[in-house]
Amino acid sequence: MENRLPSDIIAAVATAPGRGGIGVVRVSGPRLLPFAEALSGLRLSPRVAALATFRGSLGEPLDQGILIHFPAPHSFTGEDVLELQGHGGPMVMRMLLTRCLELGARLAEPGEFSRRAFLNEKLDLAQAEAVADLIEATTAAAARSALRSLTGEFSHSIHTLVSDLTELRMLVEATLDFPEEEIDVLRDTDATARLEKLRQNLADLRQRARQGSLLRTGLRVVLAGLPNAGKSSLLNRLAGEERAIVTDIAGTTRDALRETIQIEGIPLHIIDTAGLRDSDDVVEKIGIERSWKEIESADLVLQLVDARSGVTPADRAVAARLPSGTRRVVVHNKCDLAHKEPRRWEEGVCVHVALSAKLGGGIDLLHDVLLEKAGWIGHGEDVILARERHLEALAEAAACLDRAAAQLGGIEFCAEELRLGQDALSRITGEFTPDDLLGAIFSRFCIGK
């Protein structure tokens, strides 16, 4: 990777906006001991917390707190780093940051500390992204998965695949370098079996990454159906509180109502929509139009029907209007009123669940179906908190290996596909990553990280 190491000093408030007991200003750059002495008048020892009075340009005290110096290369960024731990008021943080800028630092860009850690090889790209994922984690499962990536578990898996792929490339390309040799390198080294093992290991990693992607983005689940099917009651039951207004009056729900819940650590974005029917009410018609738009972007549609009447022609008409490829679960609500027990069954490729949103019977069955539709393994302790670019790179590498397996008889083409597959994997950890992609990735980080 090209050397693009910066030489200036950056500073930013590293703690969240607002008031708190402690606030932190982080500074990173070359040779920061004179910077620290000008700020506090102290000569600091490495990694020793010192009680300091932070002073302005005229020597006036700005705040009193803790000052720590982490000398390069033993710091987060790999450069000299200062941490100013002061009182956590917005004005105090602003004064300390302004003083750092007066001393020659510039305001850090979003993600610039993590980017410097990447450029100084303190983190690879997947680990740097895991820093942001850990900060943004909304569930305990997502936080644990991000921490595993931060400590290098995902990167280790990628490096193992790249190492095995490099070894296979050497064997395949040996037949190109020495064509006069009458030794069948591919046969003697069992290259076919090696490639098949690589494909299987990559498939396993892709599965773990797809699972982890759910932890980041969640599953978008839309509740749809005729008026009075119990969509709002089901939303309230899933949310565990009264989030939607429930009445016997058809058309009560006029607009989409969103609620995020967790099942086994998986975020589910539940969207309650207006009842689907023909209406002359102008406001209700707008709500119904929005319902169909929500359905178009759904990962999964829960179509609610009344268990007392079963699937009616009107329900079948709603199902027929669903966009092609829509994944659907039919929920037979009000099974208590129909004097039926909660249960689950399948008709063709469609799963049906009978439950009572009002009483809660059968909700556990629906939870299981939602996890199945999400493709969740069930334990989540080995998943990779993957981003979309990771999934795309893994898919590209898998396609390359598939083509390589199909072209083992044409060594030149096979060798090229193996090379392309290796490049795709290496983009995940940043070994081969263009500058514009780095800029896009780190620009999404928060300032101070």
Image: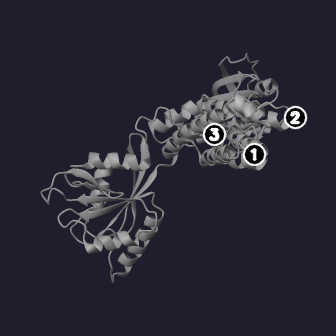
Q: Is residue 242 visible?
A: no
Question: Which of the colour schemes (rainbow, by chain, secondary structure, one colour) is used?
Answer: one colour
Residue at 34%, 49% in the rendered image: 369
* Callout 2 amino acid: Glu
The quarter holding residue 394 reads top right
Q: Secondary structure at mark 2?
A: loop
- Gap between marks 3 and 2, in whole Å? 48 Å
Q: Position of residue 284 (x, y in %)?
A: 35, 76
* Callout 1 amino acid: Gly
Residue at 82%, 32% in the rendered image: 182
Q: Residue furthest front?
A: 182
Q: Position of residue 324 (x, y in %)?
A: 46, 67
* Callout 3 amino acid: Glu
Q: Is residue 70 visible?
A: yes
Residue in the foreground of this view, choosing between 31 and 263: 263
Residue in the foreground of this view, choosing between 176 and 382: 176
Which of the two marks, 3 or 2, is nearer to us in this view? 2
- Quadrant for the C terminus, please: top right
Q: Position of residue 302 (x, y in %)?
A: 35, 59
The local crowd at label 1, few if under 14, some if 14 to 19, many if 20 or more residues have their Cα within 10 Å, is: few
Q: Is residue 127 above or below residue 246?
A: above
Q: Which mark is residue 410?
A: 1
Q: Which mark is residue 180?
A: 2
Relative placement, left or right, of 356 versus 448 is left
Q: Is residue 306 above or below residue 400?
A: below
Residue picked out by circle 3: 129
